[in-house]
Amino acid sequence: MRVLIIGAGGHGQVVADILLRMADEGSGAILAGFLDDRGDLLGQTILGAPVLGRIADCKNIRHDTVIVAIGENKTRQRIFKMLQQDGEDFVIAQHPKSIVAPDVRIGAGSMICGGVVLNTAATIGGAVILNTGCTVDHHNYIGSFAHIGPGANLGGEVEIGEGSLVGIGATVMPGKRIGAWSIVGAGALVNRDVPERSVVVGVPARVIKTI
Ligand SMILES: CC(C)(COP(=O)(O)OP(=O)(O)OC[C@H]1O[C@@H](n2cnc3c(N)ncnc32)[C@H](O)[C@@H]1OP(=O)(O)O)[C@@H](O)C(=O)NCCC(=O)NCCS
């Protein structure tokens, strides 16, 4: 299975590393290479795989599947949808050293980093990032294009709306809901529901602005 990684920045390199670790475990994934719209990366080799061209070159390069490895949620959504319309297949990058309950559903193109714990009956949308060492407890619902930052902890039955970011080390208490396209600041403690398109920070978390 030849995988093209869309985005050759730091995030793309973490995705590449996960795919290589999956290959070590016999996934059959082969890194076809990276695509990136920053021209200066063209021709470089990263983690043994070449930067082959721009995103628009996707259909001209031999591959079986893609993954959009762009950290910014809105941009990841835009490029995912564009490639979806082109009929692309999206691989899930799941680090072998993550703990994922067997009944968890994970949408196409999502990324589960090393050290993540994902508990029973959770549902993860498409093109979601569960970053290094975050924990997502039982019966969570994580909307598509969301990003749960490194070391963040979500209690049971938490709901994260589409496109929202939970910052590094933040905590969301059980049963709380974060509306779509909101941001929970690094280190925040969410003890009440967060409306959509809101930025919250602090312990306890309070709204500082609307997006
Ligand atoms: C919350 C956040 C989005 C705000 O960013 P911003 O809109 O650029 O806001 P500013 O940096 O201008 O900060 C606005 C105010 O909020 C405070 N603030 C910002 N982030 C904060 C945080 N995480 N906790 C507490 N206070 C915070 C600032 O100190 C500032 O306060 P002041 O007005 O009294 O000086 C950002 O700071 C943040 O925490 N992002 C999360 C990043 C992350 O963890 N990403 C994971 C990817 S690996």
Image (tube, rainbow, N blue to C red):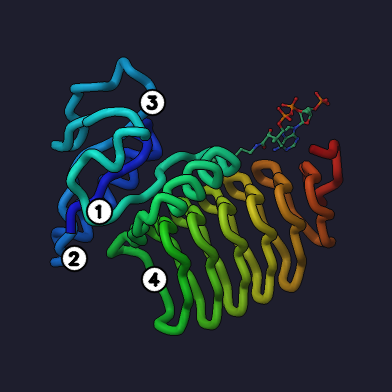
Mark 1 to mark 4: distance in Å? 16 Å
Q: Residue at x 40, y 39 (%)?
A: 11
Does label 3 or label 1 sit earlier along the sequence?
Answer: 1
- Which residue is labeled 2 in the image? 27
Does label 2 or label 3 sit earlier along the sequence?
Answer: 2
Asked where in the image residue 200 lies, by quadrant, the reply is top right
Instruction: Please identify, in this view, whether the residue under mark 3 or under mark 1 is nearer the observer.
Output: 3
**Relative horizontal placement of residue 138, taking residue 96 as reference (left or right):** right
- Which residue is labeled 4 in the image? 99
Does label 1 or label 4 sit earlier along the sequence?
Answer: 1
Label of residue 37 in the image: 3
Residue 188: image location, x then y, percent? 72, 48
Q: Callout 1, which amino acid?
A: Leu
User: Label 4 neighbourhood size at 10 Å, few (<14), some (14-19), many (20+)?
Assistant: some
Q: Callout 4, which amino acid?
A: Ile
Per the image, label 1 sits on a secondary structure element best described as helix
Quadrant position of ligand 1: top right
Residue 83: image location, x then y, percent? 42, 48
**Relative horizontal placement of residue 40, taking residue 159 as reference (left or right):** left
Q: Nearer the viewer, residue 42 or 179?
A: 42
Q: Nearer the viewer, residue 32 or 155?
A: 32
**Relative horizontal placement of residue 157, taking residue 87 as reference (left or right):** right
User: Label 3 neighbourhood size at 10 Å, few (<14), some (14-19), many (20+)?
Assistant: some
Q: Callout 3, which amino acid?
A: Asp
Does label 4 or label 2 sit earlier along the sequence?
Answer: 2
